[in-house]
Amino acid sequence: MSPPLPDVFVSTVATSRSVARAVVDGPARKIAPRLFTSDLTSDPARIVSRNLYHVISLLVPGTVISHRTAIENRPAEDGSVFVSAAYERRLDLPGAMIRLVKGPGPLPGDRSLLDIHLASRARALLECLKPSRSGAGVARGLSRARIEEEVERDLRLGGPDALNRLRDEARCVAPALDAVREFDLLHDVIGGLLRTRAAPLTAPVARARAAGMPYDPDRFGLFQSLLGSLRRLPPRPMAAAPQSNEAFLHCAFFDAYFSNYIEGTKFKVEEAEGIVFHGVLPAARPKDAHDVLGTYRVVSSREYTARSVVDDTPETFLERLRASHRHIMGGRPEARPGEWKQIENMAGTTVFVHPQLVEGTLRKGFEIVRALDSPFHRAVAMMFVLSEVHPFGDGNGRVSRAFMNAELLAAGQPRILVPIIVRDEYITGLRAITREACVQTLVDVLTFGQRLTAAVDFSSYSGALAALRDANALEEPRPGISAKLPTPPIEHSGGSGQPQPPDDNTPSFFV
């Protein structure tokens, strides 16, 4: 029995007869000149796509994947794949155009793959800086701004040493590419990003790096996508009913209680009452108790809840962030209260913004939040930006929800409670934006949280607790139990005999 034919193969002088017989008999078919496949059903473009570098090695062995293809690691938008060869030619394949560009063969740093090579990053960047015209397809090079973005990414991922190596490698291969001028341009970009020479830069991310305020461009792109999604949603403003001081502080208690529960700081509600209302700190869990108390002190501060990001400058916004974290995490010196993180943090497979990019990315997020007109939309964006940057070593979720509610309360709208019962949906909503730029799940959860707050009369602590129990707000997520609004309405008779919140005399610590 004959061995099975490969997914793609070419016809040669030695195999032409057997290949022709395979096509006639059915085990193979032709998909391009000299190119055959044993896949008789798939779209030829899909076959070429999944075997692209193998196809190139079969049709033009000894060549080098180069120019923008070596940078982007995929065909251009019109299907062009650029390959350096001894001659110029175009090979039209299903779903791809192999565009041979006259250039040298393998150089130091190029990596071998099958019967071809992949250009080194230094070589590819120099090739992309060479003048080129698109002609019948896209240009083989990239813009100066795009090169700056690529080199800034190298700096972001590899640090200054990566750029120093890149410069040295480029200097080595530039003569063989006749790219001395292009090396000077690349040297300027590297020096500008390292702030070792006064070179003009054009890409925003590169200019920010040169100004000493680098940011995460991927997160900024995500924030811009969030901005567009929120602007397309109806604002649906919800006015808050007038609240007495007691009602305001009772609501703040549940805000702090739920916010800590989401983070895994779990107390029975009666224990949390003792911590906040009576100063009873469990001896076995003093730091957890301080987390709850610190969060309450922030979200119950009238000065804090009267401040929106629209009233801030970037500097006062960042100071408010540090101040809130300092008070929320004041019981945990190891969390460096009020200080930006020093090492990368992550949740599951999500790696948050690098410490060196925190302040710059927060400033970009600040711009996005301020661009929204609706207080509810600003609240959603604010919470997500802070959660996605994760600027502190710990306490980021508590801070993000506190700033979310500050946007609402400053605008006279009910705050959002994120009760225990919707914790999983809340986390799913955050992940949906991070991974798919889909905002609807989070908006639905937060809309419910605001409607829940509006439906509960917080003037009586016991009445509010009963209403929240009726809504399943204090239940752990499990099959058969779902979130709902409290029904029927709870009648309140006042706060007699209930735990009384302290006077609103929390220290002034917000800008």
Image (tube, rainbow, N blue to C red):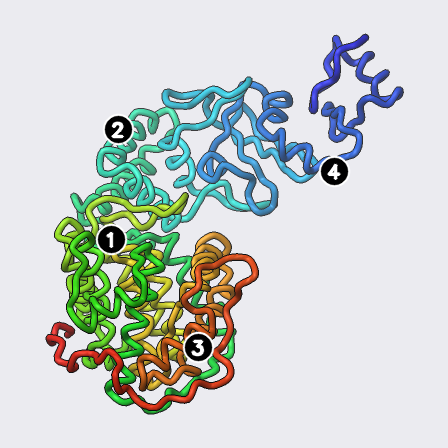
Read off the residue under disc 4: 43
Residue behind mark 1: 394
Q: In this rendering, would 29 be left or right of 259?
A: right
Q: Which residue is mark 2?
A: 168
Q: Residue 6 at what x, y percent from top left?
A: 70, 19
Residue under the image location 64 percent in, 23 percent down = 59
**Which residue is at the front of the view, 383 or 59?**
383
Q: Of the residues tagged 2 and 4, which is closer to the observer?
A: 4
How far apart, in angstroms, are the residues tagged by discs 3 and 2? 61 Å
Q: Residues within 10 Å of mark 4 (few under 14, many from 20)?
A: few
* In the depicted structure, whether residue 175 falls above or below residue 293: above
Upstream in the sequence, badge 3 or badge 4? Answer: 4
Q: Quadrant of residue 304?
A: bottom left
Return the mark for residue 452: 3
Q: Amino acid at mark 2?
A: Asp
* Secondary structure state at the residue bearing disc 4: loop
Left or right, residue 400 beside residue 424: left
Residue contact between numbered discs 3 and 4, judged by CB atoms under 8 Å: no
Residue 500 lies, in percent from the top left, at 22, 80
Judged left or right of residue 446, residue 312 is left
Distance in Å between CA atoms under marks 2 and 4: 44 Å
Q: In terms of depth relative to the viewer, which is nearer, 447 or 77?
A: 447
* Quadrant in which the C terminus appears: bottom left
Q: The residue tagged with tag 3: helix, strand or loop?
A: helix
Q: N-terminal of the two: label 1 or label 3?
A: 1
Q: Nearer the viewer, residue 382 or 35?
A: 382
